[in-house]
């Protein structure tokens, strides 16, 4: 069973209970979506550090594992939940300087759950979910709420109870922290950062890796436009972007990101935040896209994530030589193409200018057909569509990355092609037939070959498209082309 599958189905339903102006979510002791059964015999455990209360069943449908090896009268599972929640909140406070979850007192709710503590209810989700944060009350700025957690994780795909508790508690408590900043967030931000929080607490989080794979499987989709309908794995998988960005800027970025939550245009607010930090969304996205290629079987020969080899890696949009594609490239996306090259010149062309698009060519290390990729050999933009020789390349596999790092509601149309010869470029007009001269007596004819620019890849740049590697050298001056999107 997929340990997050319930959350993927649940989020859309839960959102209807979480929006301001609607009745607060009922707690399991009151009814609601996952109520305790009348047969459940309930007990509570208060964490000795204060501020947390766990509600659980000692008999009935939601009974928890009752093992009590330390003989303190509280099931070890319940103690683990409380201790993990305390450690997670301390991490959010001490390392990331985040606001604590809102309390019931801040919203004049009285002691819901029998105390002023943050309440965690252990309930039987019957496989429909594994955790949930429910809002008790909201004002225009923030919300207070409670957590629900699976009572025993029987039948879930976690390695053990420790992994299950670490994963779900860190995820749902981050939703509680988010609610201390803003009432509602778009799912690509709320779920992506909550999955990031799983790894922040547990660096070996398998759930984080699995969900990042869902993003890498669809990098041609805009970061901020997940598929419609119940919250998809893609929205959770944007955790990869947040992990990249937070590692790039340091732990204090998390609080700054959450403060953006009220912005009417969150992507634009993110771009402005990066500018304030002497960064640029375009440069960051180019480096992020380069790191994403160097994952899975292509990890190990260039900079990427410390866990790059544990990811599934990207899928080739096309795996063909020669290469041709005609499509729209959406904002904050990347697509990857693999081609086998026999060695020698590699030609590239566009049917029309595609200002805004960025291209990078990376060789497979050691001349292999596929495997770890080297840093980019060449990087260029789509301003000049003229066919050109990119470079004289050794034989082997090569990956072409096509990246749209421009924040826009508009896509960029591009018909691109690459091949070993000029004549094999499918997206550009063929060369005219050469003029011939002949000797009337002998019948011999000669033709002059088409001239080739000795500067091979006009407009190409050498180096990496990352933040540092984008200090690239222009090898030929090209005409000015407006950067307005089509």
Image: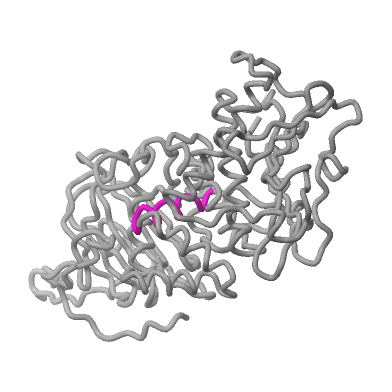
Of residue 210 and residue 463, the one placed in the foreground of this image is 210
Residue plotted at (63% across, 39% down)? 4
476 inside magenta stretch: no
Q: Is residue 44 above or below residue 351?
A: above
Residue 378: x and y in percent read: 22, 60
Q: Which of these two is toward me, 307 or 333? A: 307
Left or right of 95? Residue 396 is: left
Which residues fall within the magenta stretch? 237-249
Q: Nearer the viewer, residue 406 or 395?
A: 406
As drawn, 193 above or below 371: below
* Residue 89: % across, % down: 53, 45
Please name the residue shown 56% across and 42% down the image.
Answer: 170
Q: Which residue lies at the image location 48% right of the left edge and 36% below the top edge? A: 205
Q: Position of residue 31 (x, y in %)?
A: 88, 43
Image side of residue 451 versus residue 159, left or right:
left
Residue 242 lies within the magenta run: yes
- At horizontal 28% and vertical 86% (from top left) the residue drawn is 480
The answer to whether residue 205 is visible is yes
């Amino acid at each position: 069973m997929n340990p997050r599958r319930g959350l993927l189905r649940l989020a859309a339903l839960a959102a209807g209970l979480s929006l301001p102006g609607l009745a607060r979510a009922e707690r399991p002791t009151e009814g609601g979506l996952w109520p305790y059964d009348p047969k459940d015999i309930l007990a509570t455990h208060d964490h000795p550090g204060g501020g947390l209360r766990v509600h659980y069943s000692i008999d009935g449908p939601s009974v928890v594992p009752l093992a009590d090896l330390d003989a303190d009268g509280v099931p070890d599972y319940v103690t683990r939940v409380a201790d993990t929640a305390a450690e997670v909140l301390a991490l959010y406070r001490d390392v990331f300087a985040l606001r604590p979850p809102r309390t019931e007192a801040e919203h004049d709710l009285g002691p819901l759950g029998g105390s002023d503590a943050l309440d965690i209810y252990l309930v039987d989700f019957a496989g429909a979910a594994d955790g949930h944060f429910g809002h008790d009350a909201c004002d225009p700025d923030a919300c207070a709420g409670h957590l629900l957690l699976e009572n025993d994780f029987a039948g879930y795909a976690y390695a053990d109870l420790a992994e299950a508790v670490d994963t779900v508690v860190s995820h749902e408590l981050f939703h509680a922290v988010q609610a201390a900043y803003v009432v509602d967030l778009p799912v690509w931000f709320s779920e992506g950062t909550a999955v990031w929080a799983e790894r922040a607490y547990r660096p070996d989080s398998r759930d984080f890796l699995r969900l990042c794979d869902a993003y890498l499987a669809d990098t041609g989709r805009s970061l901020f436009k997940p598929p419609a309908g119940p919250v998809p794995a893609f929205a959770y998988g944007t955790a990869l972007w947040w992990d990249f960005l937070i590692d790039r800027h340091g732990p204090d970025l998390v609080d700054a990101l959450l403060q953006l939550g009220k912005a009417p245009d969150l992507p634009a607010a993110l771009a402005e935040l990066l500018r304030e930090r002497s960064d640029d969304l375009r440069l960051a996205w180019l480096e992020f896209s380069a790191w994403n290629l160097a994952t899975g079987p292509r990890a190990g020969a260039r900079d990427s994530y410390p866990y790059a080899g544990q990811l599934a890696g990207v899928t080739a949009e096309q795996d063909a030589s020669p290469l041709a594609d005609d499509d729209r490239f959406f904002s904050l996306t990347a697509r990857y193409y693999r081609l086998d090259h026999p060695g020698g010149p590699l030609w590239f062309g566009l049917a029309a200018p595609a200002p805004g698009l960025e291209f990078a060519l990376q060789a497979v290390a050691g001349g292999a057909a596929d495997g770890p990729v080297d840093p980019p050999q060449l990087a260029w933009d789509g301003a000049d569509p003229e066919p050109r020789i990119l470079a004289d390349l050794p034989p082997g596999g090569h990956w072409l990355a096509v990246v749209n790092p421009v924040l826009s509601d508009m896509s960029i149309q591009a018909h691109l092609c690459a091949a070993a010869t000029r004549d094999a470029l499918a997206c550009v007009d063929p060369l005219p037939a050469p003029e011939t001269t002949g000797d009337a007596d002998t019948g011999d004819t000669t033709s002059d070959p088409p001239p080739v620019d000795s500067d091979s890849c006009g407009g190409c740049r050498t180096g990496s498209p990352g933040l540092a590697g984008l200090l690239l050298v222009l090898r030929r001056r090209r005409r000015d082309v407006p950067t307005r999107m089509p």
